[in-house]
Image (cartoon, rainbow, N blue to C red):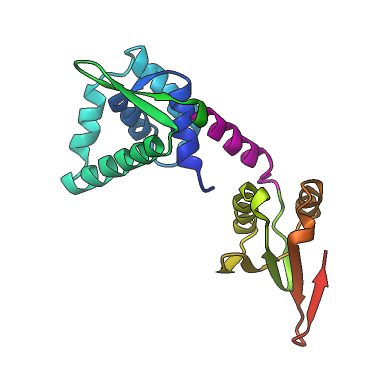
């Protein structure tokens, strides 16, 4: 989901002040798409010296200069954005650069955790008889819910036609509708079934 890499980095930083070089090593050793637990394990191994800095050199030597530059640039770009957004702060000593999480960063973790909890990947993807048009116009007061709704629609294999207009061939799970009702968002949602005869059928 969107924000996943931000969540993993912030969680890794929150659980212990890390040198940027150690954080990069943990991500590289864990592999692309690794879980937060895997990254944290690698971070612990690095902190306890069970993994040496030579591991980073081995990884670097196994990559082309171009690939290494892309990975390193992307990693630094993510850290720079987090710092610019006030989610982390850097500190230096004579030899190293450390990163620490801010209060705002802790709030961001809570926000992302809440989104993950409210995004049950157990939502079953069931093909519908007709295409479904899902549109929403969420007020600014509930703007955080927009990302969650988009995440669910992506999971249900819907395609974005416009920013708040999505089309798919999956049924809308009742559990998702219940979540929308509980959050008071159902009033800002339109779900339309496109029948074979070309008519539109609204459902809630």
Relative to the observer, which residue lies in front, 101 or 140? 140
Rendered residue at 61%/56% (across/down):
150
Residue situated furthest bottom in the rendering = 197
Residue situated furthest top in the rendering = 48
Report the side of 71 relative to 200 (left or right).
left
Main secondary structure found in the magenta portion? helix
Q: Quadrant of the C terminus?
A: bottom right
In the rendered image of this protein, does residue 186 appear above or below residue 107?
below
In magenta stretch: residue 5:
no
Rendered residue at 75%/67% (across/down):
190
Give residue 81's quadrant in the image.
top left
In the rendered image of this protein, does residue 122 appear above or below residue 57?
below
Give residue 129's quadrant in the image.
bottom right
Relative to the observer, which residue lies in front, 49 or 143? 143
Rendered residue at 43%/34% (across/down):
86
In magenta stretch: residue 116:
yes
In the rendered image of this protein, does residue 92 appear above or below residue 162?
above
Instruction: Give x and y (percent) for residue 4.
Output: 50, 41
Give residue 73's quadrant in the image.
top left
Rendered residue at 62%/55% (across/down):
155
Number of labels in the image equals 0
Relative to the observer, which residue lies in front, 86 or 40? 86
Q: Which residues are magenta?
A: 105-122
Instruction: Give x and y (percent) for residue 105.
Output: 49, 31
Instruction: Give x and y (percent) for residue 79.
Output: 35, 36
Report the side of 17 relative to 65 (left or right).
right
Instruction: Give x and y (percent) for residue 66.
Output: 19, 48
Relative to the observer, which residue lies in front, 20 or 131? 20
């Amino acid at each position: 989901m969107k924000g996943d890499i931000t969540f993993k980095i912030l969680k890794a930083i929150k659980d212990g002040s890390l040198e940027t070089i150690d954080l990069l090593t943990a991500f590289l050793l864990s592999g692309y798409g690794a879980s937060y637990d895997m990254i944290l394990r690698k971070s612990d191994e690095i902190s306890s010296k069970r993994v040496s800095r030579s591991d980073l050199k081995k990884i670097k030597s196994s990559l082309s200069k171009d690939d290494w530059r892309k990975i390193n640039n992307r990693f630094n770009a993510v850290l720079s954005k987090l710092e610019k957004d006030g989610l982390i702060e850097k500190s230096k000593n004579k030899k190293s650069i450390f990163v620490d999480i801010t209060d705002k960063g802790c709030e961001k973790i809570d926000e992302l955790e809440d989104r993950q909890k409210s995004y049950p990947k157990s939502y079953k993807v069931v093909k519908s008889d007709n295409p479904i048009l899902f549109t929403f116009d969420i007020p600014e007061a509930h703007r955080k819910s927009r990302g969650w709704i988009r995440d669910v629609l992506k999971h249900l294999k819907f395609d974005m036609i416009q920013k708040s207009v999505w089309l798919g061939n999956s049924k809308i799970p009742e559990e998702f509708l219940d979540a929308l009702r509980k959050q008071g968002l159902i009033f800002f949602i339109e779900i339309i079934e496109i029948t074979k005869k070309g008519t539109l059928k609204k459902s809630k």
